[in-house]
Image (spheres, rainbow, N blue to C red):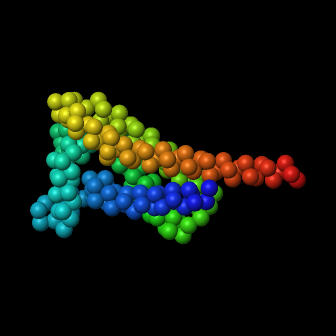
Amino acid sequence: MASSRSWLDKVYLTYFLIHLPILFCVDLVPLYPASLWVPESSPLHFLYNLRAYYLETYNDQFFAPPPAPIPSFFPLFAFLELVFHLPVSVWAVRALFRGALSGGAELLLLVYGMETAMTTATCMYEIYVWDSAVVTADQKMVLLGGLYGSYLAIAILLTGDMYARLLNRLNTVDARKKVQ
């Protein structure tokens, strides 16, 4: 059990180490003042170019500029990334580097995994129903199977693993109570 936890914790650490730059360089960029990243002379203009490359390569309509319709839930999801994903990700990197997650850490990661799975699944459904004239079936497959699908898989794995760890903790406490 400990070796599988160690291996999974390394997977989670890798995920969070990748997730942090994606948050700063892609997901949270629209929350930055446009003057910092949109004009060619701006100090963070490379973020504009990165988003343009991402949109051109994957045709992810969540990142398309207006007049592309943005689903009503998407600004809420961006806000959750700022106030929940970002601090949890920073904290998780530190906790996973130290090793041996506490029960409280497992509970927080269970909530994170559940929230990430739900928001990612919502985005995946939205992608699935995008107009085929705008996003081709092949582009949808890349988005669903690769980019968003991998986030969903890790979120489900994290949720299941943290649930199992917490259940094991609770069962151990219950067993001790029965002995007393």
Please identify the quadrant where the N terminus is shown: bottom right
Determine the residue positioned at 56% across, 56% down.
Answer: 4
Determine the residue positioned at 48% across, 44% down.
Answer: 156
40 or 55, which is in the foreground?
Answer: 55
Q: Residue furthest bottom?
A: 98
Residue 72 screen position, x and y as percent: 33, 37
Q: How many marks?
A: 0
Q: Is residue 79 left or right of residue 110?
A: left
Q: Is residue 69 visible?
A: no
Determine the residue positioned at 35% across, 37% down.
Answer: 124
Q: Is residue 34 left or right of residue 175?
A: left
Residue 134 screen position, x and y as percent: 17, 34
Determine the residue positioned at 57% across, 50% down.
Answer: 162
Quadrant in which residue 73 is drawn: top left
Quadrant in which residue 117 is drawn: top left
21 or 72, which is in the foreground?
Answer: 21
Q: Is residue 24 visible?
A: yes
Residue 172 screen position, x and y as percent: 74, 52
Relative vertical location of residue 11 with respect to residue 64 in this rendering, above or below: below
Q: Is residue 139 left or right of residue 174?
A: left
Q: Residue furthest left?
A: 40
